[in-house]
């Protein structure tokens, strides 16, 4: 049985350190007194090695990794050298020999430091820059000159197979220009990117890519950088997360990541009342309708993380329901769940289910949301979005639910589509029911309205991704088309925040008020298309075409989150605004819904749409997509 590898490494280190310490004795004697015999007495040389090995024990000298030698290791070398240089004269004194000069201990310590440190530094440099044939490294320019850049450069130095060579850095400001990080120059600020790249091109040292190391670089600043890179034919990547670059986490290969489209939204993180959410959800029975959809599934995830007593997942699609149920079983095995297949329009089924499980809280995300599809199937859209919402609300109230949270849309504001008008009618019924509930101490209804969600099933982003995979073109309906966007995680977090506020503080909601998520500024869809092409490392209108196809039925150029007659009211909670649209008597809305439902069941499309327009007078139906001047 051989010597264990770890012990063999320690013995090798001790042998090398002892040899270097033995060499240090005559060298230090010569430097202290060049005229004396450096090898006299000869027996003192091995004692010099022994003194170093003994002095190095407290500083763990023999267990150091030379390959990863750092400042802490070199400090240990210095301390052991000083201790050995102080111990060695004691050995000489006991042998009755005086040091060659009084300065000998200091010279001996310095010689030990140099002889022990230089091989360690040299070995590390050799490991980081091996002398062997490797593919030529691609030159990159780092964006950011803070801790992210420091960690990236350290990780790059430790990854001997990394195919990148840093040509310099751009800081987020200009104050650091001219300084260096790990020997690499800071060439300017991010605002100087165009000039710096032009200068590098003129000097024939243009980098192959830009690497963003600062996680705070998002939004317009990042989009502008990408435009500059696009003009130079360069791709933009993100460095790995700082935790992935932490030396303590190991020395895995450094892998660059593409910039995500979410990074270009420039949406600052909104502080959320997590404690309030926990109080709302923990130990309660919670129902999520539309649990297999984009919003519903994220609601289910975030609700499950808050520890409900029972989580009811309701959806009409078996596969989508199975997916989210399986995911939650893996992520939150301790949370009790029930997967329920049901149609929100099926009143007997819903009443039976809710009476059986008696949820305390209902999140209603089930809806038909795709505007052209609902235009082609208007009766289905009305039945699901308006009648289905009423069915869920009535069943929840009958089952004794404390609150119901309704997910609405910006398309309900001045709607031009059946989808938007049906969601506005659903809002009206929930508003009326909430007002009645306040007066009688019944179920609270909280309506939350927001715009498009990036990456959702019907979102334009997956469509663009599919079109890019085919080589284009990317199809945009109109050059002036604008939409509000936010990430699904952010949207659901704010929905939960609104739920906390709406259920805990009745005074926080104006009479009939609707929560509106602060969506920031609307984004031009054609700009989004161009950015996605750049993210794929291609050039808009050169490598990939953008084709304008015209408005589709029910679409409008601009979405609004507030009606002209419902000016936004601020709330005390970041990211949440309040709309105060008109309200109606619940009995009137209920009768209208019965009439519309009867028309839908009878297949009377024209009558159903006329009744819908009567209830939602601002409904300006763009049935064929020809009303390009429609603003809202």
Image: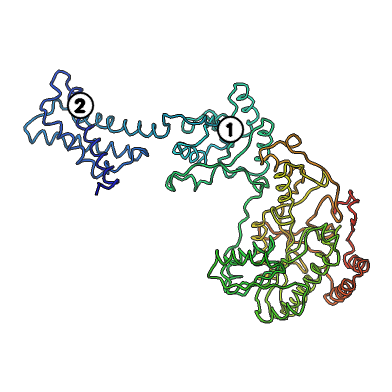
Q: Quadrant of the rendered structure where residue 41 is?
A: top left
Q: Name the residue under label 1.
A: 174
Number of the front mark, 2 or 1: 2
Q: Quadrant of the rendered structure where residue 534 is?
A: top right
Q: Residue at x 70, y 43 (%)?
A: 532
Residue 96, percent from left and from top: 6, 32
Crowd tier of the residue under label 2, counting other residues whose Cα lies within 10 Å: few below 14, some 14–19, many 20 or above: many
Per the image, label 2 sits on a secondary structure element best described as helix
Q: Which of marks 2 and 1 is nearer the N terminus?
A: 2
Crowd tier of the residue under label 1, counting other residues whose Cα lies within 10 Å: few below 14, some 14–19, many 20 or above: some
Residue 97, percent from left and from top: 8, 30
Q: Residue at x 89, y 49 (%)?
A: 629
Q: Name the residue under label 2.
A: 28
Q: Quadrant of the rendered structure where residue 608 is?
A: bottom right
Please report contact status of discs 2 and 1: CB closer than 8 Å, yes or no: no
Quarter the C terminus occupies: bottom right
In-image side of 540 versus 417 (left or right): left
In this view, 251 is above or below 206: below
- Give the Cα distance between marks 2 and 1: 49 Å
């Amino acid at each position: 049985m051989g010597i264990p590898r770890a012990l063999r490494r320690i013995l090798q280190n001790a042998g090398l350190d002892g040899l270097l310490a033995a060499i240090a004795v005559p060298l230090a004697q010569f430097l202290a007194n060049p005229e004396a015999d450096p090898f006299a007495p000869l027996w003192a040389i091995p004692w010099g090695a022994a003194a170093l090995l003994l002095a190095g024990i407290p500083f763990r000298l023999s267990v150091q990794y030379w390959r990863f030698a750092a400042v802490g290791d070199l400090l240990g070398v210095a301390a052991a050298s000083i201790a050995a240089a102080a111990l060695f004269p004691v050995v000489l004194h006991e042998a009755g020999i005086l040091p060659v000069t009084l300065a000998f201990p200091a010279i001996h310590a310095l010689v030990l430091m140099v002889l022990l440190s230089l091989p360690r530094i040299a070995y590390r440099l050799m490991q980081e820059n091996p002398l062997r044939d490797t593919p030529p490294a691609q030159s990159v320019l780092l964006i950011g000159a803070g801790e992210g850049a420091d960690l990236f450069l350290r990780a790059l130095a430790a990854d001997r197979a990394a195919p990148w060579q840093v040509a310099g850095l751009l800081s987020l400001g200009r104050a650091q220009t001219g300084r260096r990080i790990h020997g690499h120059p800071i060439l300017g600020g991010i605002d100087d990117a165009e000039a710096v790249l032009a200068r590098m091109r003129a000097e024939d040292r243009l980098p192959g890519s830009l690497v963003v190391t600062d996680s705070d670089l998002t939004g317009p600043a990042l989009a502008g950088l990408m435009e500059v890179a696009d003009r130079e034919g360069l791709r933009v990547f993100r460095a790995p997360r700082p935790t992935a670059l932490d030396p303590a986490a190991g020395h895995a290969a450094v892998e660059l990541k593409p910039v995500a489209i979410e990074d270009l939204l420039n949406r600052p993180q909104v502080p959320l009342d997590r404690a309030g959410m926990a109080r709302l959800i923990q130990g309660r029975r919670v129902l999520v309708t539309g649990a297999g959809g984009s919003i519903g599934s994220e609601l289910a995830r975030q609700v499950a993380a808050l520890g409900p007593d029972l989580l009811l997942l309701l959806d009409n699609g078996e596969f989508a329901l199975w997916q989210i149920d399986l995911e939650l079983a893996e992520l939150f095995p301790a949370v009790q769940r029930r997967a329920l297949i049901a149609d929100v329009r099926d009143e007997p089924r819903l009443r039976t289910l809710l009476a059986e499980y008696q949820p305390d809280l209902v999140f209603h995300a089930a809806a038909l949301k795709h505007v052209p599809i609902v235009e082609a199937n208007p009766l289905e859209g009305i039945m699901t979005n308006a009648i289905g919402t009423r069915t869920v609300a009535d069943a929840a109230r009958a089952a004794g639910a404390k609150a119901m949270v309704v997910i609405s849309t910006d398309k309900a504001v001045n709607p031009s589509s059946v989808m938007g008008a049906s969601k506005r009618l659903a809002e009206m019924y929930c508003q009326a029911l909430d007002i009645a509930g306040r007066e009688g101490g019944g179920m609270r209804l909280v309506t939350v309205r927001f715009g498009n969600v990036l990456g959702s099933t019907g979102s334009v982003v997956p469509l663009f991704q599919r079109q890019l995979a085919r080589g284009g073109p990317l199809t945009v309906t109109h050059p002036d088309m604008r939409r509000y966007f936010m990430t699904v995680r952010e949207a659901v977090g704010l929905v939960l925040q609104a739920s906390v506020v709406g259920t805990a503080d009745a005074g926080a909601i104006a009479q009939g008020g609707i929560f509106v998520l602060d969506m920031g500024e609307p984004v031009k869809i054609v700009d989004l298309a161009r950015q996605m092409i750049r993210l794929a490392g291609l050039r808009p209108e050169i490598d990939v075409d953008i084709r304008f196809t015209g408005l589709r039925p029910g679409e409008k150029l601009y979405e609004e989150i507030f009606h002209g007659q419902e000016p936004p009211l601020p709330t005390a909670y970041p990211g949440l605004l309040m709309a105060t649209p008109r309200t109606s008597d619940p009995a009137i809305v209920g009768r209208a819904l019965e009439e519309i439902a009867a028309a839908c069941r009878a297949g009377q499309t024209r009558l159903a749409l006329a009744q819908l327009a009567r209830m939602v007078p601002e409904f300006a139906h763009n049935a064929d997509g020809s009303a390009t001047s429609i603003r809202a």
